[in-house]
Amino acid sequence: MQKRDDFSSVPAALLQSFGTPQLVTLINLASREHLANADIDKVKQQLAEQGFYLQFPPPVEDLLAQHKRQP
């Protein structure tokens, strides 16, 4: 079982890119069926296989481009 604040499973390349990791929140995935912006099964799988899950923010919507495409 992984300990709190143990980031040893995160690849060195990621640590170099993002800097020193910092624990922000704990989420009990066992009691959840859904996550807001991620597939919970994929998150659980990657945590089990890799020891971490990397999530990027959603892309910024280009509302002007959407407006220009409308007839």
Image (cartoon, grey):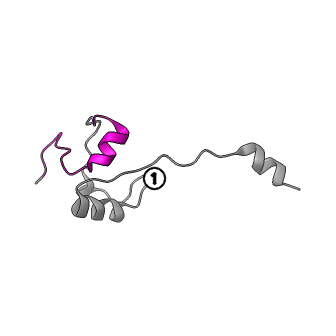
Q: Nearer the viewer, residue 69 or 19?
A: 19
Q: Nearer the viewer, residue 29 or 70?
A: 70
Give x and y (percent) for residue 69.
82, 54
Residue at x 36% of width, y 39% of height: 18
Secondary structure beneath disc 1? Answer: loop
Q: Looking at the rendering, in which quadrant would you find the N terminus? A: bottom left
> In the picture shown, does residue 4 fall above or below 66?
above
Give x and y (percent) for residue 43.
33, 59
Judge left or right: residue 61 versus residue 20: right
Q: Which residue is mark 1?
A: 37
Residue at x 84% of width, y 54% of height: 70
- Packing grade of label 1 (10 A; few <14, some 14-19, many >=20) is few
Give x and y (percent) for residue 61.
65, 46
Give x and y (percent) for residue 57.
48, 46
Task: Please report the bounds of the magenta region as a residue range.
Answer: 2-20
Q: Quadrant of residue 32?
A: bottom left
Residue at x 29% of width, y 61% of height: 46
Q: Amino acid at mark 1?
A: Asn
